[in-house]
Image (cartoon, rainbow, N blue to C red):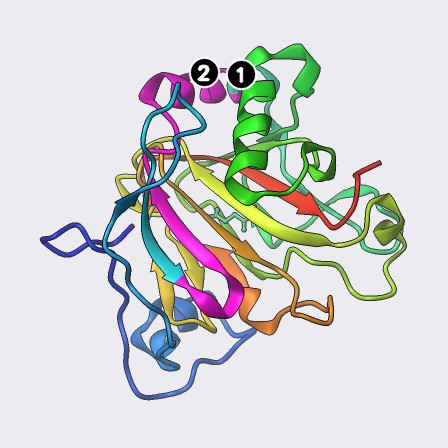
Amino acid sequence: MRANSRGIPTSTASTSSPAIGGELDNYRGSAVFARVPAYQCLLPGPVPGVFHGGGMPQRLLQVDRIGLSAWADLLTPENCQNLIAIGQSLLRPATVTDEQTGQEVAHGERVSEMAWPKRDDYPILQSLAEGIAQLTGIPIDCQEPLQILHYRPGGEYKPHYDAFAADAPTLRQGGNRQITLILYLNAVEEGGETAFPELGLQVSPIPGGGVFFRNLNEEGQRHPFSLHAGLPVRKGEKWIATQWIRQEAYV
Ligand SMILES: O=C(O)CCC(=O)C(=O)O
């Protein structure tokens, strides 16, 4: 996460409006950070550690509009290395879920490689799933399989919503994606932030940290403020693990 000298994440603000759906530079330029959010910075404080033997993840930031919180120390360096190794063994070009068919399809908006390991094949994925259930308070059954993503320089995921449209047939697989959790597995040399254009916020990857947020509003519809992007990696590579959590048991 971007952080000031006291380690508290910051965002950048300006006065003009962002052009949602425009070219990527519009998201990265100062105009992106126009609608200064009503978000609240919390001082880091301990919460029950769930991913590594009772350690103490730190909540660094809370944005109430979409229940976004950014965390440090969710994963140990060893956890991160293990997840990267799993990803390395299974990588293939990234796809997105087609709203109509529920099938995975290639999409120019997503320039990365991904792996979708089976939880049963890796004990770390089971304990991670349990930790995520504890962190979010949502039963494990609602979790889609964890997705491990790898971006090379130039790789990115353009602004998008994770929640599906209200009439998408894939909703039959457990309702909509109510929560997204993105875990950062390595330090990116330059770029690769997760941007929330509507909140005026960028979260910079720090290894072992993560960000989670709600994709739906109180009526269960796609929340406009959940729009987000993986900004281009300018130098180095980026590894993340994304967990989508449905409203009901995922089938
Ligand atoms: O790469 C990122 O930071 C964002 C990833 C993302 O948007 C997703 O997996 O849905």
Inspect this view and state whether residue 180 appears.
yes
The kind of residue tagged 2 is Asn
| Residue 160 in the image, given as x and y percentages of width and height | 60, 61
Q: Is 75 located above or below residue 99 in the figure?
A: above
Helix, strand or loop status at disc 1: helix
Q: Measuring 42% from the left and 69% from the top, which residue is drawn there?
A: 27
Q: Is 215 located above or below residue 97 in the figure?
A: below
Q: Magenta residues?
A: 63-87
Q: Residue furthest left?
A: 5
Q: Which residue is mark 2?
A: 82
Q: Is 13 located above or below residue 67 in the figure?
A: below
Mark found first going from the N terminus, 1 or 2: 2
Foreground: disc 1 or disc 2: 1
Mark 2 lies within 8 Å of ligand 1 (Cβ measured):
no
Assess whether residue 71 is covered by the magenta stretch: yes
Q: Measuring 81% from the left and 55% from the top, which residue is drawn there?
A: 99
Q: Residue furthest bottom?
A: 16
Q: Are marks 1 and 2 in contact (CB under 8 Å)?
A: yes
Assess whether residue 102 is covered by the magenta stretch: no
| Residue 124 in the image, given as x and y percentages of width and height | 53, 16
C-alpha gap between disc 1 and disc 2 = 8 Å
Of residues 246 and 117, which is closer to you in this image? 246
| Residue 20 in the image, given as x and y percentages of width and height | 53, 76
